Image: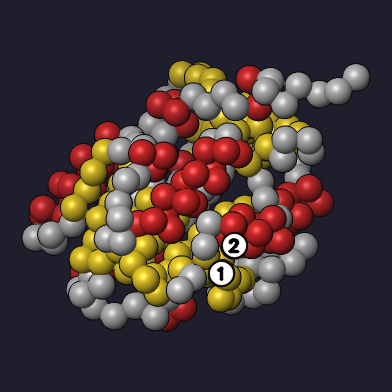
Amino acid sequence: MSQNLDDERFYVFDWDAVFDVDDYLHFYEDTLRAERTEHQVDVLVSHLGMTPGMRVLDLGCGHGRHAFELARRGFDVVGIDRTEGFVELARREAEASRLPIDYRVADLRTLDEEASFDRVLCLFDVFGLHRDDENLDVLRRITRALRPGGKLCLDVRNRDWMVRALLPVTILQKGPDLMIDRHVFDPVTGRLVDYRILVRDGRTREARFSVRLYHFTEIRALLASVGLHVTEAFGTWDGDPIGLAQNRMVIFAEKDD
């Protein structure tokens, strides 16, 4: 019996629960450390050939940690995120530091810019949250938004690592609070579906979400199909090669002439 590729189980995304601002910052505090952000921005500036004054678009900017650091270094930054709470927090921090960052509440699927940016960032699984046709359209919109010679950094999970090393359950503990994720990978759609139980302050909540996982050759082909060619690719932010031992892919691409 053939599998129904439109099965809604693979596409449910409880957005407000998954990206609750307070919960997100609470559980991912260690991942969001300032020194880690500074290192990642160092990598971006180096491998994207960025110079102060360039116009940079940060897609899925969250509470603005990369946008903030880039603006602090003299870049003209626009940050877009679908979650209003993150954008409000980012705006407050930018205003407090007198940094002129243009933050907007928007879905990246509605990006409508024409040759407006020198560099585009799409980091930490922002790409892949939607259906395949929508993900491809996002790449088309990114290409359109880039100026001639513009560059993109795309940071996603490595499907090859995930298939090899996926655990059925992972638990993130923060003091007495727990984030419990049950993972189900569907090899036909290429989607990883997570069933989450959040235990915090004596309350238990549930959420479900999924992300499309790609392997490198697939990403490279998708980028090529929309007019972007890969210039460099790494398996970590420290420059390790993509491989079965690395769970991420940090990919740099340039707009074709």
* Pointer 1 residue: 229
Q: Relative to the observer, which residue lies in front, 206 or 149?
A: 149
Which comes before the other along the chain, label 1 or label 2? 2
Q: Which residue is pictured at 18% across the width and 57% down the height?
A: 101
Query: Which quarter of the rendering shows the N terminus?
Result: top right
Q: Is residue 82 left or right of residue 104?
A: right
Label 2 sits on residue: 224
Determine which quarter of the picture holds residue 209.
top right
Give, as a three-letter code, the residue at label 2. Answer: Ala
Amino acid type of the residue tagged 1 in the rendering? His
Position of residue 74 measured from the top left corner of the image (x, y, whole percent): 20, 73
Residue 153, horizontal then vertical, whole percent: 47, 64
Can the viewer see residue 170 in this picture? yes
Mark 2 burial class by Cα count in 10 Å: few <14, some 14-19, many 20+: some
Q: Tell me, yes or no, whether the two marked residues, 1 and 2, touch with CB atoms within 8 Å.
A: yes
Q: How many marks?
A: 2
Q: SS of the residue at dot 1?
A: strand
Instruction: Check the image and report above or below for 117 versus 5.
Output: below
Q: Is residue 138 above or below residue 8?
A: below
Label 2 residue SS: helix
* Nearest the eye: 13 or 220: 220
> How far apart are the two marked residues, 1 and 2, measured between alpha carbons?
5 Å
Q: Which residue is at 75% across, 42% downward?
A: 167
Give the residue drawn at x 18%, y 47%: 91
